[in-house]
Image (cartoon, rainbow, N blue to C red):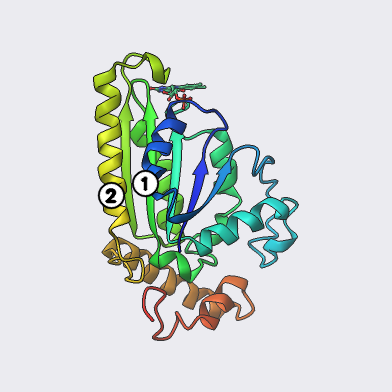
Amino acid sequence: MMKIAVFNATEKHGVTYRLKEIFLESFRDEAEITEFYFPKDCPSFCAGCTICFRGDEKKCKDAQYTQKIQKALLEADLLVFASPAYVFHTTGAMKTMLDHFGYRWMPHRPAKEMFSKRAVIITQCLGAGDRSTAKDIKDSLSWWGVSFIKEYRFKLMSEIEWDKIDEKKRNKMSSKLTAAANKFKNTDYNKRPHTKTVTKIKFYMVRMLQTDLGKKNPEYTDFKYWKENGWLGKTRPWKG
Ligand SMILES: Cc1cc2nc3c(=O)[nH]c(=O)nc-3n(C[C@H](O)[C@H](O)[C@H](O)COP(=O)(O)O)c2cc1C
């Protein structure tokens, strides 16, 4: 059964929630959907202890939350992120979750599974900030190694309460998301998505960096991780 992991930037059942529900509607009967709502499902800030960067992410003070999120991220065929714009950016709650996965950025210890994921980002705002909000999320996804990322962004323009939004406008947003969901339903998840050049460029830049770091200190955590994965040799995370 197809697996979907959903990350909601607020706990509110507002517009963002409605848009996300419309996208998920047709998957409900045929996919296993795991949803996270922030801040509830990752309530504390990263304290900057760097234990994760040093290789012991299971010892994070918030491991009881981050380990569940990690599992869902690795197992999912499709990742869905939904966020309103809060002062032009994603919510502090979503950012808090993303901070906890800084150690998964490519210059550190990216999970090879991420290179073959597909991801959807849904953002909306009243007038401006949907793009920068999506970028906040996309920055992490792309540095985690995800190549296939589709953004669905909306500007409400007049009202921020779903029921008060003009019906025509609501239908337009719904149609866009239903069409997107259909595309994602008809995708063969056994086939890897195309790996973008930008992902490969990031990988090769970090590969050079790790090779250099390893010369200076062969015990360096990130260098050892890259070496163990064979990425400093011929193995690539988007193949095999
Ligand atoms: C704290 C806060 C900050 C917001 N900042 C912006 C903003 O910078 N630009 C914008 O167009 N809308 C902004 N909005 C509106 C939201 O992006 C969104 O349209 C609204 O909260 C309705 O969505 P929701 O029901 O999912 O919360 C803000 C809302 C809140 C609560």
- Location of residue 186 in the rendering, given as x and y in whole percent from the top left corner: 28, 58
Q: Quadrant of the N terminus?
A: bottom left
**Picture quadrant of residue 51:** bottom right
Q: Quadrant of ligand 1?
A: top left
**Is the residue 77 above or below the residue 214 in the image?**
above
Residue located beneath label 2 in the image: 182
Q: Residue at x 30, y 24 (%)?
A: 170
Q: Quadrant of the C terminus?
A: bottom left
Label 2 with label 1: CB-CB less than 8 Å = yes
The CB of the residue at mark 2 lies under 8 Å from ligand 1: no
Is residue 133 among the parts visible in the rendering?
no
Residue type, label 1? Ser
Which label was assigned to residue 26? 1
**Is the residue 175 above or below the residue 47 in the image?**
above
**Picture quadrant of residue 60:** bottom right
Residue type, label 2? Asn
Q: Give me the C-alpha separation between circle 2 and circle 1.
A: 8 Å
Whether residue 33 sits left or right of residue 56 in the image: it is: left
Q: Residue at x 64, y 43 (%)?
A: 41
Q: Residue at x 43, y 73 (%)?
A: 207
Per the image, label 1 sits on a secondary structure element best described as helix
Per the image, label 2 sits on a secondary structure element best described as helix
The CB of the residue at mark 1 lies under 8 Å from ligand 1: no
Whether residue 156 sits left or right of residue 100 in the image: it is: left
- Location of residue 87 in the rendering, given as x and y in whole percent from the top left corner: 46, 25
Marked residue nearer the N-terminal end (2 or 1): 1
Of badges 2 and 1, nearer the viewer stands 1
- Count neighbours of disc 2 (C-alpha within 10 A) and say few if under 14, some if 14 to 19, many if 20 or more: few
Residue farthest to the front?
A: 29
